[in-house]
Amino acid sequence: MKVIYQHLPSVEIGGRKLVGLVVFALLVLLAAAVGAASGLLLVYSTDLPQIEELERYRPSSVTELYDGQGRVIGTFALQRRVIATYDDYPEVLRNALISIEDKDFYRHSGINVWRIVGAAYRDIESGGKVQGASTLTMQLARNLFLSPDRSFYRKVQEALLAIQIERRFTKPQIFTLYANQIFLGHGAYGYEAASEYYFSKPARQLKLEEAALLAGLPKAPQYYSPINHPDRARRRRDLVLNAMLEDGKITKVQAEEAKGKPILLDLQKDPNSLAPHYVEEIRRYLEAKYGSDQVHEGGLRVYTSLDMDLQKTARQALLDGLAAYERRHGWRGKLVNVIEQGQKLDKYEDPDWDEEPEVNGYMHALVTQVSPGAAEVRFGQHTATLSQADAAWTKRKLPDILRVGDIVYIKVLSLDTGGKSRVSLEQDSGAEGALVAIDNATGEIKAMVGGRDFNLSKFNRATQALRQVGSSFKPYVYTAVIDQGGSPDDTILDAPVTFQTASGPYSPHNYDEKFEGIITLRRALAQSRNIPALKLADRVGIKTVIEYAHRFGITANIPAYLPVALGSAEITPLEQTSAFSVFPNDGVRVAPRYITRVTDYEGRVLEEDFSDIKDVVSSRTARVMTSMLREVVLHGTAIAAAKMPYPLAGKTGTTNDFTDAWFVGFSPSLTCGVWIGYDEKQSLGEKETGSRAALPIWMQFMNVALAGKEPGEFQPAPAQQNSFVAQKKVDTPDVAPGDGETH
C-alpha cells in the first residue's frame, strides 16, 4: 500500500499535463478556426458594397402622366414600380408576407441561424447548393447588391450585408425597402405596383385572400402566376393562409372563408392605350429635355392638359366615323388568313388581344368556323357568332366572304361573362383619320387621336401629317378681307372668270359646276363658293392671305399661287385646329400645349408651362368671322350640325379627287378639328366631302363634349362698315399649273 501511495503524486501530475495539452490543442484549433473564419469573412467582405449606399438608395420608379383631373393616362418605365410607404401596406399584407417568408422578422438581427443550419443540413443531405433560409433582410440584400446565384460565397455575403442593414435601419424601413423592391411577376416590382396590376387598386385596399395571393409570389413569380397558372397560385395562396393561421394572425374561420374564394383578378389596363399618340408626343419631348434614364427610371410626375373623358369620346367618334365610311363603300375583302401563313388556329394571338376588349370597341378577331348562315370568331378569351344580320351591310353571304383562319375587323356590341359575346362585322380598308380638341381660353389640348390603331401605325396624323386642307383654308382669305375693312354683307359676282397668269389662263369653277351671280360674302363662305374666294384672294393678294395664315400659327411653307386660296396648302390637323381657335377667342391665339407641369420624384417643380398668347387680328375681325362661320353651320355646307343645341361655327374642307375630308369647328369654349383620308393620298370615293365624312365625327364628339355644360355665347359682331370689295385691285400672282379648285 505504501508503494502505491508513493506513486499517486506522479499520476496526478501526468494527468494534469495531458489535460493541459488537450486544452492547448483545442485553443490552437479554436484560434486557427477563428483566424480562418476571420480570414474568410475578411475575404468575403472585401468586395461588399458600402451599406451607406442604401441610405441614398432610390429604386427606379414609374414616370406617370396625369390628365387635368389627376387620372393616370400613361406611364414610362423600365420596371413597373410604384413607391409606397410602410403605412401604405396594410397589416393583412404585412402579416401574410412575414408568415410565409420570415416568421421571426421582428425578432432576429438579420439572419436566422437555426433556419440556416436546417437548410444547410437539408442541402448537404440532398447534395445541392446552399439555398433557402433567407430572411427578408437577406433577400433585400441579395436583390439590391448581389447576384442571384446560389453559392456558399454569395450566401455569406448576403448574411454579412443583412447584419449591417439591421444595424442601420429599423424594421419598418427594411420591410418598406423590401416591399418596394421585390419582383412579383408580369413586370411588376413591389407590392403597390403588383396590387394595381393584378387587382386595379392600391395595396391598402387588399382583402385577405388578395394579400395572401401576392405574399406567395416572391418564391417564384412566374411559376405561381395567377394569370398563367391560377391553380398553382391558389395552392400557394392557401399555403400562405395556413401559415397565417399557424402564427395566429387570422382565425380558422377567416382562413377557411378566404380559401373558399376563387382567384378574381381585375388586371390593370395599359393607361398608354387611351391616348397613345398623345403620350408618344410627350415621351419624345421629355426624353429630349430630361434624357431617357430620367424619363424611364426617375419617377417624374407629368401633369398634362388631356381630359380622359373627352379622349374616350374622341376615339369612339373617330372609329365610328371610319366604320360608317367603310360601310358606305361596301365589302372589299382581301383578308389575311393565318392558315395560309402556316399558323395554327389554337395558337394564334393577335396584338389587339393584349388589351381586354371593351363594349363598342373595335378590334381584330379570328374566324374559327363558317357555316351557311353564321361564322364563329375568337378574340382573346372571348368568342362570338356572326349572323347574316351582323354582316347585312356587305350584301354578301357569309360563306362567300369569310373563311376559317381569316382575320376580320369587328365591333364589340356586348361582352358576356360566360365568354360568349355579340359583335358586328366591320372593315378596315386602310382609311385613316385624326381628331384634335383644344380649349379656346387656355390652348390646352383636351383630346387627340392620331389614327385608327396605334399598334398598326405609330404615325401621328394629328401632328405629323401634312394634308391639303381644302376649303377649310378659305377663312384666312375672308379674314384678310374683313380685317382690311370688308363686311360680310358686301356682294361679289359668282360667275365664270379667267385669271391671266405667267403660266397661262386659269379658269376655275365651283364644286357644283353652277354660278349664283351676285351674292354676299357671308353666303359665299357659307356655301363654299370657289369663284368668290379666288376673286377675293386675287384682290387682297395671295401673299397677304398667306401672311394671315402664318399669323394664325400655320408654319408650313405655302407657295404664293392663287389656288392656295382653295386649300392646296398642306397643314397638320393640330395647326389648323389651333388656328381656328383664334376666331372664338376674340382674335387672340393661345399656343396649343400638352403639359401644364412636371415635377421630380421628390415633388420639386421642374417646369411649369404657361400659355403663349399672341394677338392675331382685332376683336372686330374675329367676331365678324365667327358670325360668318356660324352661317356655315346654320345655312351652309355644315347645316347638318344646325340641329345641335349649342352655338357652333366652322368650315368644311374637301380636296381634289376627294383625297382629304375636313371639318374644323368651334363652340365658345372648345375648338375641334377632324380629318379623314388615306395615308397614300388616294381618293376616299365619290362625294366623300368634308360634310359627309368628317362632319358626323365632329358632331358626335361635340355633342358629348358639350353635354351638361354651360355652352356660353359668341361675342356679337360689331356694326358693319363701308364696303371693301370694289375698293382694291392688285396684280394677279402666278398660278401653279395643274392646280384645280377644291371645295
Image (tube, rainbow, N blue to C red):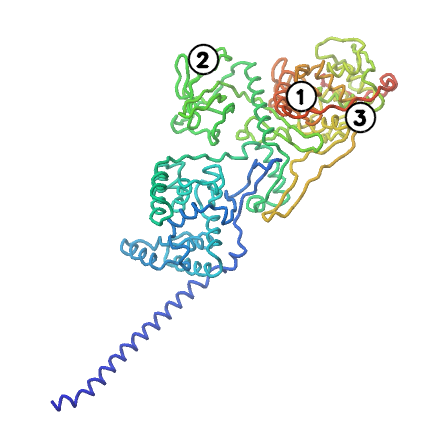
Measured from the top left, where is residue 29 in percent x and y? 31, 72
Q: Which mark is residue 265?
A: none
Measured from the top left, where is residue 310 in percent x and y? 60, 28
Are circles 3 and 2 on residues that touch, CB within 8 Å? no
Identify the image quadrant of residue 46: bottom left
Query: Total number of numbered labels?
Result: 3
Residue carrying label 2? 388
Mark 3 or mark 2, whichever is nearer to me: 2
Identify the image quadrant of residue 733: top right
* First-in-chain label (1 vs 3): 3
Q: Considering the image in quadrants, where does the N terminus appear?
A: bottom left
Residue carrying label 1? 663
Q: CA distance from mark 3 to mark 2?
A: 57 Å
* First-in-chain label (1 vs 2): 2
Q: Is residue 332 above or below residue 158?
A: above
The amino acid pointed to by label 2 is Gln
The amino acid pointed to by label 1 is Phe
Mark 1 or mark 3, whichever is nearer to me: 1
In front of the other: 142 or 209? 209
Write the residue at 45% across / 34% down. 266
The amino acid pointed to by label 3 is Lys
Q: Is residue 127 above or below residue 546?
A: below
Q: CA distance from mark 1 to mark 2?
A: 35 Å
Residue carrying label 3? 543
In front of the other: 454 or 189? 189
